[in-house]
Amino acid sequence: MRVAVIGGTGRIGRRTVTALRRTGHDPVAVSRSGGVDVLTGAGLDEALAGAQAVIDVTNTAATDRDAAVDFFATVTTNLLAAEQRAGITHHVVLSIVGIDRVPSNAHYAGKRAQEAAALDGPVPTSVVRATQFHDFPVMIVGWTRQGDLASVPPLLMQPIAPLDVAEILAEISTGVPQGRYRDVAGPEPQDLVDMARRTLAARGEDVRLVPTWRGIFSTDMSGEVLLPSPDARIAPTTFEQWLAAGGAAEIP
C-alpha cells in the first residue's frame, strides 16, 4: 500500500515511514520541509496522490487552549477534504491515553477536537491512543530547566517506546479502519521523576530535579489518570531496554 505519513519527518513520523517500508509498503513522508502546509492545505493534493491510507502524527507546541484546538481541528479538516478528493479509504490518528480525564490541559483539548473531527468525518478512521513515550521525561526537563535545576511533576504513567508506536501505526494503517482502537502502552508503570533521572544519567547530564505540581502540569494529572485501560495493547519494549539500546542518546 501507498501510505502518506503526515508529519513524516518528525520523531514518530520518520520511524513510521521506516516501519512501513520494512513491511513492504510504500510510505510518503509529508511535511512542511517537503513543501506541504497542512494548516492551509497547500500541497496536500499532490502529496496524497495515489495513496490508500493516511497516518496523521502532526503536533503543535501551542500552550493556549484555543490555539491548540484550532490547530488540530484545522489540520484534520484540511486532511479529510484532501483525502476525499484523493480517494483515501483509511485515516489514522495518533492520540494520547487519558485525554478525556484531564479537562484543564490545553493540548489534550486540541487532541479531543482532532479525534472528534476525524471520527465524525467522511473518511473511515482509526484513532490510536498511546501513552507517553520513553523520552517524554527528559523533554519536560528541557522545557523547565533553568541552569542546573529543572522542575518535574511526579506523574505516574506506563510509557511506550517510540519505535513500538510507529510499528503499531504502520500495522493499523494497512488494515481495516478500527474507529476508536484500544489504548496502546508499554509493559509497566513508571514514575516520571525516576525516569528523568535515569535518562539524564544515561546522557551524562548533571541536572537537579525538583518534583513539583507547581509548573506546567496540574494535579488533575496525578494518580492513575494517565494509565491505559485494562484491555490495552501492550507493546514489548521496556524503559530499561530502551535505555540499554541507546534511546537516551537519540533525543535531540
Image (cartoon, rainbow, N blue to C red):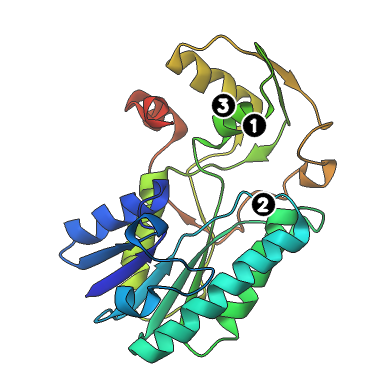
Q: Position of residue 69 (x, y in %)?
A: 70, 66
Camera-nearest label, 3 or 1: 1
Q: Position of residue 148 (x, y in %)?
A: 65, 11
Q: CA distance from mark 2 to mark 3?
A: 25 Å
Question: Which quarter of the picture shows residue 166?
Answer: bottom left
- Confirm whether residue 144 shows in the render: yes
SS for tag 3?
A: helix
Category of crowding for the residue at label 3, using alpha-carbon neighbours closer than 10 angstroms: few (below 14), some (14–19), many (at least 20): many
Q: CA distance from mark 1 to mark 2?
A: 13 Å
Q: Amino acid at mark 2?
A: Ala
Q: Position of residue 125 (x, y in %)?
A: 48, 80
Q: Amino acid at mark 3?
A: Met
Residues 16 and 7: in front is 7
Of the numbered discs 3 and 1, the one sitting upstream in the chain is 1
| Residue designated by label 3 | 195
Tag count: 3
Up the image or down, 160 lies above or below 145; here it is: below
SS for tag 2?
A: loop
| Residue designated by label 1 | 143
Residues at marks 3 and 1 touching, judged by CB atoms closer than 8 Å: no
The answer to whether residue 122 is left or right of residue 53 is right
| Residue designated by label 2 | 62
Q: Quadrant of the N terminus?
A: bottom left
SS for tag 1?
A: helix
Residues at marks 2 and 3 touching, judged by CB atoms closer than 8 Å: no
- Give the residue at x 46% y 60%: 57
The answer to whether residue 125 is left or right of residue 143 is left
Camera-nearest label, 2 or 3: 2
